[in-house]
Amino acid sequence: MGTHDLDAAVERVAEDIAAMETRGAAAIADAAADALQQQATQSDADTPEAFRAELRAAARQLLETRPTAVSLPNALRYVLQRMDGDSVETLRRNTVAGADEFRARLDRAQTDLGRVGANRLRDGDRIMTHCHSTDVLACVETAREQGKELSAIVKETRPRNQGRLTAERLVELGVDVTLIVDSAARRYLNDADHVLVGADAIAADGSVVNKIGTSGLAVNARDRGTPIVVAAQTIKLDPDTMTGNLVEIETRDESEVIDPEARDAIGDIDVENPAFDVTPPRYVDAIVTERGQFPPESIVTLMRELFGEGITDPWVEPDARRETVVESGEDRP
Ligand SMILES: O=P(O)(O)OC[C@H]1O[C@H](OP(=O)(O)O)[C@H](O)[C@@H]1O
């Protein structure tokens, strides 16, 4: 990859995604499409092949940042599939247009999803949230625009406390917010009408990969009889899972859990920090997408419609392309 001229914007976007300065599956997809667009705009490749190779290298650099949110490869796939043409200028134009189109679709999808999700919310409802999902917030925003009064119990979501971001945004939307520590969730589930969470990836069997703690929340919610709704644009659907591949779960640095000094003070311990977990479909009542809401078991039909049976990895050099099967990652559910 070192032989390719990567634009500074690509490096910057990749660093921001890895450090979680840019986070949330939709925002990651948007930033990745933007980075490819900047690479295409700035490229001084003098042959179509050099241009293509540069864009593929940029995509690989972006892919290396975080492994779980499938919106990232889906965004790269969308843009690179539109990189078409016989001259550098045509390739540049088509790639830039592909990125623009992708980002516009992303925006539209979230608005449409918000309308679908808002239909599930009634005036006076109380939701419980986990982490920070813009797809969830789109549902709340539309419901608020429809004049529905809502309140929310917001889990802080250790270790990075993205619940505080959700709390802030909900307050801006005029929602009454109660912030709780994660371990208090069961205690407050009786007060909630819905658990409403986002997703980083959805597998073909309807399993939902979301922020660590989602699966425990879903099991508790089912026990309490509180419906569990997942707000996830179709960009969160993982086409690789149609051929039996599992979603890779990101493990992050232990310093997010405990600072090194405090850790040393305790003595010889192991610290683990998985960023996501897998909620089996039987605990999920509905997946809300821009195409309507689906029971998790039927999501595979939507996946086939959207991705067909075969998928490609357009960032791989042509002589190394796979057919349809890829290697499984580690620590997959
Ligand atoms: O696409 P939207 O709905 O904004 O976010 C989806 C999901 O992305 C986040 O992951 P992280 O904070 O990037 O690890 C959360 O798990 C959230 O539910």
Image: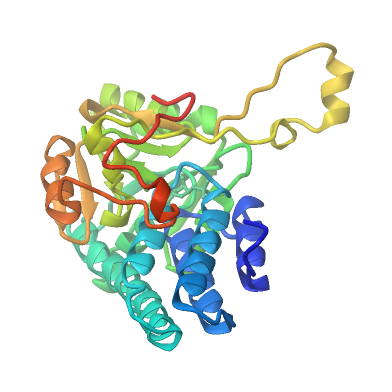
Nearer to me, 320 or 130? 320
Image check: 167 left or right of 10?
A: left
Q: Quadrant of residue 119?
A: bottom left
- Please state the horizontal and vertical placement of residue 17, each as a whole percent of the image: 59, 56
Question: How are the residues colored?
Answer: rainbow
Task: Point out the image quarter for the N terminus.
Answer: bottom right
**x 28%, y 48%: residue:** 237
* Residue 44 in sight from this viewpoint: yes
Q: Residue furthest top?
A: 268
Q: Is any part of residue 206 visible from this angle?
A: no
Toward the viewer: 88 or 258? 88
Number of marks drawn: 0
Please tell me in which quadrant of the rendered image residue 88 appears.
Answer: bottom left
Residue nearest the viewer, comparing 119 with 267: 267
Q: Residue at x 16, y 43 (%)?
A: 299
In the image, taking residue 14 as reference, residue 210 lies left or right, namely left
Name which residue lies at 37% across and 45% down.
Answer: 199
Screen quadrant of the C terminus: top left
Q: Is residue 157 above or below residue 90?
A: above
Q: Position of residue 81 (x, y in %)?
A: 32, 66
In terms of depth relative to the viewer, which is nearer, 309 or 86?
A: 86
Which quadrant holds residue 129? top left
Position of residue 152 relative to residue 203, above or below, is below
- Which percent across, then down, holds residue 283? 25, 28
Q: What residue appears at the point 41 percent right and 61 percent down from the top-left corner?
A: 76
Q: Give the x, y percent position of residue 204.
A: 22, 37
